Amino acid sequence: MKKIMKISAMIFVLVTFLLLHSTPQAAIITYVAFMGYPKEAFTSKIEEYEFLDKIEENNFGKLHPDAKIYVLTNPPFEKATGGELDTYKVRKVGFFYFAEFYVHI
């Protein structure tokens, strides 16, 4: 019985990870929600930010060719810095997508 519970738990964790990192949008929603902004994560519209991709194509493309920039239409507001957390870099690693906040100046 314990063996079945361990296998079930491992399968649950694996399926959850697959779902949370299966698309760029899912990766951004997961990242923003775990940062502490679940309302903004699920209510904001996510769009690819092609303009920034073209501007920083020389520098950004060399760093990671499978990465793209996405922007939230209703981004979370960080009180500590007084800024909007609106731009995210999403990298594709194998079958998975991983998001992180992207600071553009």
Image (tube, rainbow, N blue to C red):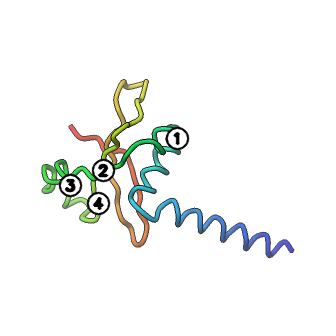
The count of marks equals 4
Spatial CA distance of label 1 from label 2 is: 18 Å
| Amino acid on which disc 1 is placed | Pro
Real-space Cα distance between discs 3 and 4? Answer: 8 Å
- Numbered badge on residue 67: 4
Instruction: Name the residue carrying label 3.
Output: 60
In the image, which is nearer the foreground, mark 4 or mark 2?
Answer: 2
Residue, x 26% and y 61% (percent of image)?
64
From this view, report whether residue 34 is shown above or below residue 2: above
Residue in the image at 86% along x and 74% along y: 1
**Which image quadrant: the C terminus?**
top left
- In three-dimensional space, the C-alpha distance between marks 3 and 1, rounded to whole angstroms, equals 28 Å
Q: What residue type is labelled 3?
A: Phe
Say what secondary structure mark 1 lies in: helix
Secondary structure under tag 4 reads loop
Q: In this view, does 12 lie above or below 75?
A: below
- Kindly identify the amino acid type of the residue bearing the numbered disc 4: Ala
Say what secondary structure mark 2 lies in: strand
Q: Which of marks 4 and 2 is nearer the N terminus?
A: 2
CB contact under 8 Å: marks 4 and 2: no
Position in image of residue 60 (x %, y %): 20, 55
Residue that numbered label 1 is attached to: 38
Judge from the rendering whether residue 60 lies leftward or rightward of residue 36; answer left or right.
Answer: left
- Which disc number belongs to residue 47? 2
Q: Residues within 10 Å of mark 1 (few under 14, many from 20)?
A: some
